[in-house]
Image (spheres, rainbow, N blue to C red):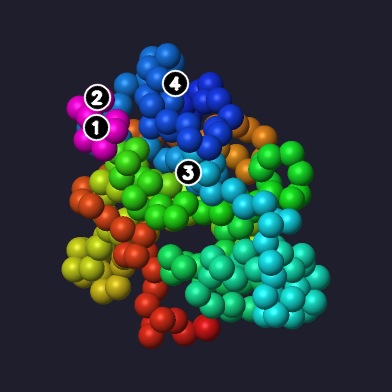
Amino acid sequence: MPIELIAIPALPLIEPGDDLPGLLLSCASAAGIEFRNGDVLVVAQKIVSKAEDRFVYLPDVVPSAEAIAIAQKTGKDPQLVEVILQESDEIIRARPGLIITEHRRGFISANAGVDHSNVRGNDQWVLLLPEDPDASAERIRSTIKIATGADLAVIVSDSHGRAWRLGTVGIAIGVAGMRPLTDLRGEADLTGRALQATLVGTADELAAAASLLMGQASEGNPAVLIRGAEYTPGQGSLQELIRPKETDQFR
């Protein structure tokens, strides 16, 4: 079964307070794109965060003693480090030029997702991840379903590096309308042997596929519709993708 990836064109630059679900609907309609049952809409975190006004003006931030100490160790701005600390539950690693954290939502990433790129006109502003990416995905999903009748899934995606491999890939940080994992345990492989431990990160795979069209620089395709993908419908949550600490063999 073929899978289609369709970038929703002509989305404007998103500003705080913009009706993001409404813009997605209107831009899709103008391009002749229909939402259908079983579709997956992948939306870049950055436009979700912008619409939700997750901006922070660094000159307004007062760094703590911990932030100043980490800034001296890493060479980063103390005010930026303070924002990273506020978005984190734990600092996993810190060295010159790099801070790895456990975000408040449970995933491991650089700088707790705090980002300068494609954010306003200067380095004094940073953008945080959505306060609740699952809820953000659900707002988009429910608005589209009410407007069109289509029962689809929505993924909020972000670009992450990986501890053991080079290169940035898209991953899911929020989901709605789908179970982010597909459990194949007990299913037969090609030889008829029952699979023992196979959990497929379906939401992450779809986010990575969408990032091929989204790009990582100035491509300007922050929303991608995926048609023909198989997934398990359901409420879904980012927490289903987070490895429990007791099974983390590397921390």
Dominant secondary structure, magenta: helix
* Circles 3 and 2: CB atoms closer than 8 Å: no
* Image location of residue 168, percent across then percent down: 61, 54
Three-letter amino acid code at the position of disc 3: Glu
Gap in Å between the C-alphas at discs 3 and 1? 21 Å
Q: CA distance from mark 1 to mark 4?
A: 16 Å
Which label's residue is closer to the chain start, 3 or 4?
4
Residue drawn at 76 percent across, 44 percent down: 122
Location of residue 54 with respect to 7 vertically, above or below: below
| Amino acid type at image mark 2 | Thr
- The quadrant the N terminus occupies is top left
Q: Amino acid at mark 4?
A: Cys
Residue 126: x, y in percent? 65, 51
Q: Quadrant of residue 248?
A: bottom left
Residue 63 or 209: which is nearer the viewer?
Answer: 63
Label 2 secondary element: helix
- The residue tagged 2 is 148
Q: Which residue is mark 3?
A: 52
Residue 208: x and y in percent read: 48, 48
CA gap between label 1 and label 2 equals 5 Å
Point out the frontmost of discs 3 and 1. Answer: 3
Residue on which disc 4 sits? 27
- Determine contact: label 1, label 2, CB under 8 Å: yes
Query: Which structural element holds mark 1?
Result: helix
Q: Position of residue 129 (x, y in %)?
A: 52, 54
- Tags 3 and 4 in contact by the CB under 8 Å rule? no
Say which of marks 3 and 4 sits in front. Answer: 3
